[in-house]
Structure formats: structure tokens, C-alpha cells
Image (cartoon, grey):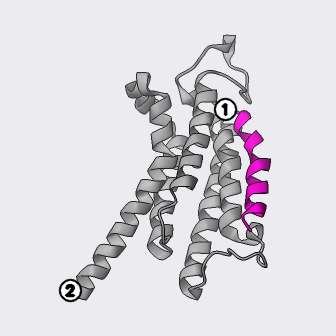
Amino acid sequence: MNELFRTIAKKIFSIAQGGFSGAIISILPATLIYHRHICQFFQNLDWTLIGFFAICIVTGSIVYLFSPPQNFPWAALFYLFCYTACAALCQKTALTLLYLEPCRQISSNLSTIPPLITIPGLVLIFLAAITQIKAALKNHQASEPLPNSTDEIASKHPFYESWLLFMAGVPLLFGVWLPLLALPGAWVFIKWIN
């Protein structure tokens, strides 16, 4: 009975840890950037941002449930937190927008972003989530760790590709292009870690 209780407690902790990770990279940066207008921010949330928050939290929970990391990935979470915060800040200050706002007003309303820009971003984030969940399920079934030797190429592993898809989708979701400049550096880092 104690062993069953421990197993259930471990699974619940893994789900909570994954949900926390998803919240760190999605909800926390947006709320910190829009903290002065937080009530207005949550009142004016459109369905793409709610989808973004939900995808990040659910994906984190599922990945941590089936393939929990040995160590909590603080560095990766901090990087993705800063990346999402950069996209939100660029959108809030109307810097490097992918669309034209009337009179170039500084907007605290994310619903002004045209759907032709946000929907592809949400689709990329959803594809990243599906790829990451598939990689976690495959890792759980095969019990093989993520590639970490020099013989294996990290960019071929779906887990790493999913982070590149995520990083391509977040700026589109916020309607800005400046964070996209970090993609080549992320690609080089993924190649370099092997």
C-alpha cells in the first residue's frame, strides 16, 4: 500500500512540476510585462493567448509525467522565460511589430494583433507540444534517454526540434519579429551541446 501511495505521489508531483514549468514559460512572463494593467490584461485575453497558456501547462504536465528529468531544467526554463518576456515586451512597447497599429499607439491589449499572424504562431506552438509529447512517450516506452553523446545529433531528436518550433511560434503569437533573431543562436547551441 505504501509503495502504491509513493508511486501516485510521484506521478502527481511530476504533473505539478510540469505544469509549473509550463506556467513559468507562458503565464509568468506575460503577467510580469503587463503588471500595471494586469486586470485589463486578463479581461482582454483572446483565445490565442489562452490556448498558448493551456498548451504550455498541459504539455509540461504530460512530458514530466512520462519522462521526468533527473534534474530540474532551471537554465532552459529561465531562457524560455526571458524569450517569452522579450516577445511580450516588444509587443507592449510596439517595437518590431509584424503589423501596423493605427497611429502607432502603445497597446496593452493583445487582441489587436491580426489573426493572420497569431494563428500560425499558435499552430507552431501546438506542433512543438505534439512533438515534445511524442518524444516523451517514445522515451518512456523505449526507456532511452535524450541523446547526449557526440555520436548522436541533437537536432535530429524531436525534443530539440520542438523547442525550435516553440521559439518560432512565440514571437508570431505576440506579433513581433525581434525574438526570431535568437533562432540561429538556439540552432547553433543545439548543435554545440553534442
The kind of residue tagged 2 is Asn
Residue 190 lies within the magenta run: yes
Q: Is residue 122 left or right of residue 23?
A: right
**Label 1 neighbour load within 10 Å: few <14, some 14-19, many 20+:** some
Q: How many marks?
A: 2
Q: Quadrant of the C terminus?
A: bottom right
According to the picture, the residue beneath numbered tag 1 turns out to be 114
Q: Main secondary structure of the magenta part?
A: helix
x and y percent of residue 31 in the render?
45, 34
Find numbered disc 2 in the image and state the secondary structure of the residue it sits on: helix
Q: Quadrant of residue 16?
A: bottom left
Where does the magenta region start and end? 176-194
The kind of residue tagged 1 is Pro
Q: Does residue 98 sit above or below 186 in this rendering?
A: above
x and y percent of residue 139 in the render?
58, 80
Task: Give the Cα distance between marks 1 and 2.
Answer: 54 Å
Q: Quadrant of residue 95?
A: top right
Question: Which residue is found at the position 53% from the left and 41% from the top?
Answer: 49
x and y percent of residue 7 in the render?
31, 81
The disc label shown at residue 147, or none: none
Q: Is residue 125 left or right of residue 24?
A: right
Answer whether residue 21 is visible to the viewer in this image: yes
Question: Which residue is found at the position 51% from the left and 68% from the top?
Answer: 63
Residue situated in front as seen by the camera: 53 or 147: 147
